[in-house]
Amino acid sequence: MSNLESLKFFWPELILSATALIAILSDLFYERKDSHKVSFWAIGGLLLTFITIRLFGGSSVNGLFMGTMALDPFSEFFKILIVLSTIIVMLMSFNSSELDGYRKGEYYTIMSIMAFGLVMMTSAIDVLMFYVAIEIVSIMSFFLAGYLKRNPNSNEASLKYVIYGAFSSGVMLYGLSILFGLTGETNFFAIKNAISQLGPDSNLALILSIVFILVGLGYKISAVPFHFWTPDVYEGSPTSITAYLSVAPKAAGFALIIRFFNIAFGSNSAMGSDEWSSLNSLPWPFLIALLSAATMTIGNLVAIQQQSVKRMLAYSSIAHAGYMMMAIPVMSQSGIYGIMIYLFMYMLMNLGAFFVVMYVQDKFDGENFDAFNGLGWKMPLLGISMTLFMVALTGLPPTSGFVGKFYIFAAVIEAGNQYYWLAFVGVINSVVSLYYYIKVVRHMYFEGERSDIVSLPESKLTTSLVLVLALPTFFLGWYFSPLVEWANNSLNFFLGI
């Protein structure tokens, strides 16, 4: 489809682009103390984007912009997740004392541009588009990580992010160039057809290509051993941005991994554990299963040692990437929608946990475990909500976290006895994670002095946002069938079932 014809399906992305432009122009007319008002334009644009995504729901076009992008319910699912998480983080930022003294207009503008890049990642079906989208996201992430320019930790976080990001992007680009050299194609579907005609003498080059591409995508989802940037960057970034980086890029990264490997290297439907048809030169499913086990294990073991709740959540986000990676080697229909369900649940509980950390950091000037002492008695709403988020992140019933893990583990077990060991490793890691999540609860209720003075957050926005995140985290543990049906329908359309 030509570029002009494609524009009529491109309204969400066009609105996001206009949102970023309006945000940066409107910031010119506000004084520094009023620059937070740019958020009204940004959030309004994101809400309009959300509406247009829903209006185009159910459409399916694979050849947008000369075959570089696709519009389907699969991308719609991830676009909604990304837009929702962006809106939530912008609302979280309203009362963040970390951002005081900085022009917030730039902050909301950069977030809007980053959301645009993330949305593009979910729709890309061409190597060039997928790389450009990743670079948009990466560059905006560098700015956001170092947004607190007068904070040395934020500067360090941004510098490390740039170094690791540049390295991983370069390695991935080299892998993509090898793939293009082998196939002469950039479209995912054309790459699949070209690979099927390659001879055995191309195996080594193909292996190197896939390894280098996995380095870049593994960096994006914080998979071991490409995770080294995550703790320092998450700790040094503004807490609201840490929350955003832990959810939105991870979701877009998994969407891209699923689409790229399913189309370019899979069978006509979902790739089964024995159907990595174009990659049979190595036991790729087993190797990725090992990466999954290493990711969740290292993330959990290092999280146990942390004294900062923010840094603990950073390492736990690595572990959660490992849980979701369990379904990648399986790549069955149930495995893919298990990832989709998990990501939606993870968005709610992880953003909620970081929001409470941000509030405690602002209110009590600390993010260590001791800063949470007695919080459950002093501020029952925050204490109960944080307890719920910690239980959900562990994956215990009756929370949404249990439902997410249930579908991931069910897909792994369903794949056959060759993956039972991976499910066992996942269960052990879930038990290990219980230690450091419950440690937060212990400090909130059993450490420090019990207070008889009960209070609510001063801001109604804070109270409302905590409830908006906590209530679905609880109720989706009981009534989750609409979400499961939505994810399943999105996947069915994507797979052509």
Image (spheres, rainbow, N blue to C red):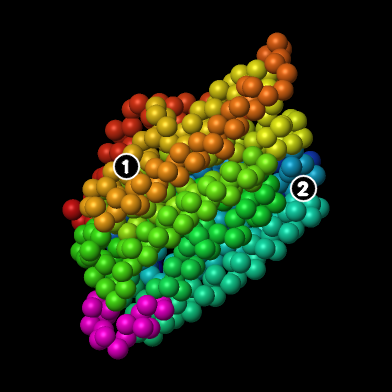
Q: Is residue 67 placed above or below 10 in the rendered structure?
A: below
Q: Is residue 433 placed above or below 187 in the rendered structure?
A: above
User: Residue 417 at what x, y percent from top left?
Assistant: 24, 52
Instruction: Give the class, few, some or many, for how many residues have Cα within 10 Å of label 2's Cα (few <14, many ≥20).
Output: some
**Residue 479 visible to the viewer:** yes
Q: Earlier in the sequence, mark 1 or mark 2?
A: 2
Any magenta on residue 195?
A: yes
Instruction: Give the class, few, some or many, for how many residues have Cα within 10 Å of label 1's Cα (few <14, many ≥20).
Output: many
Any magenta on residue 476?
A: no
Tag count: 2
Residue appearing at x 71%, y 15% in the figure: 451
Circle 2: residue type: Tyr
Extreme residue toward the left, this view: 497
Residue pointed to by mark 2: 102
Q: Nearer the viewer, mark 1 or mark 2?
A: 1
User: Residue 182 at what x, y percent from top left?
Assistant: 35, 84
Q: Which residues are magenta?
A: 192-209
- Give the Cα distance between marks 1 and 2: 43 Å
Residue appearing at x 39%, y 27% in the figure: 398
Along the line of sight, the residue nearer the viewer: 236 or 306: 306
Label 2 element class: loop
Q: Quadrant of the N terminus?
A: bottom left
User: Residue 439 at what x, y percent from top left?
Assistant: 59, 32
Q: Is residue 74 placed above or below 445 in the rendered structure?
A: below
Q: Main secondary structure of the magenta part?
A: helix
Label 1 element class: helix
**Quadrant housing residue 208:** bottom left
Circle 1: residue type: Tyr
Residue pointed to by mark 1: 407
- Residue 301 located left or right of residue 425: right
Residue appearing at x 39%, y 73% in the figure: 210
Q: Is residue 334 placed above or below 93 in the rendered structure?
A: below
